[in-house]
Image (cartoon, rainbow, N blue to C red):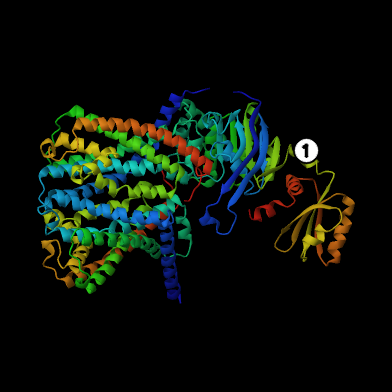
Amino acid sequence: MTRSTWTIFWRTVIGRAYPRIIGLQREKSWLFFDVFLPLLSVAAYVYIYRAIEAPPEFLGFVVLGGAMTAYWLNIMWNMASQFYWEKETGNLELYIIAPTSRMAILLGMAIGGIVATTVRALAVIAIGTLVFRVPMTVTSVPIFIAVFVSTMIALYGLGMLLSSLFLLFGREAWHMSELLREPVFLVSGFYFPVKALGFAVAAAASIVPITVGLDAMRQLLFPAMMSDLRFLPPEAELAILAGSAVLFLTLAQRSLAFLEQLARREGRLTLRGQ
Amino acid sequence: MRRGVRSRETWRSLRIAAWLGWQVESNWADPFVFAIYSVIKPIAGALILVFMYVVVARGGLENPLFPAIFVGNAFFIYVPTVLSGISWSIIDDREHYGMLKYMYVAPLDIFAYLAGRGIAKAVIATIALVITLLLGVFALGVPIEFASIDWPLFIGVSLFGAAILTFLGILLGGITLITARHSYYVGEAVAGALYLFCGVVFPIDVLPAWLRWIGQAIPLTYWLEALRRAMIGVGASRTLDGLSDAGLLAIVAGSSFGVAGLAYVCYRLAERRALGRGLIDMQTMY
Amino acid sequence: MRTDVAIRTEELTRVFRVRRREAKGQKREVVALDGVSLSVARGELMGVLGPNGAGKTTMIKILSTLLSPTSGRAEVAGVDVVEDPWEVRRHIGMVSGGESSGYGLLTVEENLWMFSQFYGIDSKTARARIRELLDIVGLADRARTKIYHLSTGMRQKMNFVRGFMTEPEILFLDEPTLGLDVQTAKVLRDYVGEWMRDRGDRTLLLTTHAMHEADELCDRVAIIDQGRILACDAPVRLKRSLQRDAIFRLRIGALTDLESLIGGAEGVVRFAQTPREDHTEVDVILSDENRLPEVLGAIRNRGGSLLSLEKREPTLEDVFLSVVGHGFEESEESPQ
């Protein structure tokens, strides 16, 4: 019986999302380590601003940035480097020989991971807003949702692109994921408006979708404070995000195919213990 | 004789684990790439703080708080590195390399082994620390003068601080023995919490009273304050002004023994549970 | 595209280049497969027999699209594995021995269901097939057990089910009974035989270094060593080719340098020696049974003691010895 490519695609997505979702239910320690403890880390940045007597909107910047770090870390650790773990445990070769798309497998992982990540992000925003009395009002809900969704699509597209590196590389790529933490937190303006780094740096940092996504969301939540601190108008940033989404997803598809072929040629698809 | 055998075993475990830890950390790239990695991460971390001050603080980097905060932030590099290094080695050995069971079968001192795995991370953290301090001194005007450093205080508090971090890492290692793989960054998550309570990047005076007592109960708060006084002659928190340098050192020294005892008990309890439930070779990857 | 040839390789070669850091004075290139040409008909159960490091797994990896050849060509179900790996994957399945794949937090059934989804099998059909196969391999009572609680044998049974549940046209089994106990290995071998008999269009390529497994199951056996196919025929014909020779097993005590003693004797076609605790076991292939007294005389003259002597029917191991020139165990000991 021949099955259509589309049937295999969406069944793969569901199948691969399943272990992530069921794992969250079976080992609930993630609620403490992935939600509660990171909340404390966000609170630390709030208190930095309090110590230097920053305007209350800056507390909001930090809360929002802290929520978005959850997604960035999810991309880096639960998506980009996931193929490395799959390779080490022997699952990768089983994925490769299955007549299914790598994008479907990654999408399944992303959907599975997004559940925990969103819980973490919402917890940060809810508690941040309530405990620190951060004044947040959305000036345009449709644009805000559009910005958030575009940011997610572009971000996960970037994650898929990065994951293709792990088909070829071993531990080097894992360290690259580590490397992309603090520098990205810095240049993407997780904790302060990215414009403080100068237009050129902000423009270069826009390669990371969260940079413009965060800036746009801050403008929609804190329009008065952001009027002097914004990078680009939200509409322009939304356009950049949409373009990034298309770009990264296209590049991811090509990169996955190319690097898989390269890894197959060099015998690295099944190379373990690196 | 038995004591002699055990101490040789301890030394051997420490030595081999330190070697193994270094191999794992350093053999993934050529030295140049490794050097870049070691430089970029700490500098980026420090610059986040710098730009927060530049954007908001009165006086920017001239703000009187900045030097103490910068120094505290720099030394805090050890915390996530060592904590995650030790707890991560449990997960790495168990889930990735399938070797944890062999560590348990071998005549190995597991505490020395875990401490040894932390040594490699500590070496990397030291490189990051030096780079960060050099950035602070030469680019940001942080007033650290080599001749003015209180070396007895610095050495004393560093040694006891290293012990605290090591045993804390072992305690977290015990937790990872009995949890699934997604707690692989338990070390970093706990470090994030310590970042809040220990007055790393802001004086603990800023915390509400009901949170401040948590910070005052954590030895690392005093460790950081003592390091600041040793390096630049002043601390960051008015709350701790009443404590002399000797007092700070005594607190850090005394609490290192307390943390050691707690870590030993917690790890052994977790180990017993893991052995009872057959978790030493558990692979939960999802 | 349906073809009578399920698997075909032409001068298939795979060379691994060892990186400088690891090589350190040793060879920089490792030839894992060296011009292998093989053809497996649809409906055939083909065995590939060889010691560790012979190239069996490398061949399977190329045929299952996990590895590209350095040169040569391979086709599976009439499709080139390099040019169109996607199409190849629609026709194949694979089970490897000694595997630890799967997600520890999921149950047996859940792991299997997840993999079935990668093949687009609807859940109802998948679950029915999984239950049936788990019953056959004796794992039905563990369907709801998380796999990190399973023993090695049970995990391998689960892997077996994973390979078969997708009903592949062509199945690769790479040392599937590796590390399993005798009973479990037999259960799995029996199932393989039944699976093949069930439908005449299924093809199976089995790699193993267990001679009896190849002998029991395979329609044809290819003997591989150091990346080359040295013989390929039905087990009975391979063994028959040796029947003109006489095969003896000698157990000899207290004698060194058997190499020159026996190797130099008249009529000795091939021999292999295996040191045991207090004696040496020597398998000798003689061109003529009447040469045996000369060999025994040489041993006696040198002061050796003959502990036992038996004449044997040729086995695949003898075929290996005859074809390769040394024993199976010696082959595994020699550096690559």
Tell me the subunit letter for badge 1.
C
Residue B270 shown left or right of residue C258 in the figure: left
Residue B227 shown left or right of residue A6 in the figure: left
Q: Residue at x 13, y 64 (%)?
A: B240
Foreground pick, B139 / C130: B139
Question: In the image as oriented, which residue stretches furthest toward the front?
Answer: A200
Residue A192 shown left or right of residue B270 in the figure: left
Q: Position of residue B276 (x, y in %)?
A: 42, 54
Res B124 seen here: yes
Classify residue A22 by image quadrant.
Answer: top left
Neighbor class of circle 1 (other Cα within 10 Å; few <14, some 14-19, many 20+) is few
Is residue A261 shown above or below A2? below
Res C146 seen here: no
Residue kind at label 1, given as amino acid type? Arg
Foreground pick, B252 / A211: A211
Q: Position of residue A159 (x, y in %)?
A: 35, 39
Q: How many marks?
A: 1
The C terminus of chain B lies in which quarter of the figure? top left
Classify residue B234 by image quadrant.
Answer: bottom left
Question: In the image as oriented, which residue stretches furthest toward the right?
Answer: C290
Secondary element under disc 1, as helix, strand or loop, is helix
Is residue B223 shown above or below C8? below
Q: Position of residue A194 (x, y in %)?
A: 20, 43
Q: Position of residue C134 (x, y in %)?
A: 53, 35
Residue under label 1:
C237
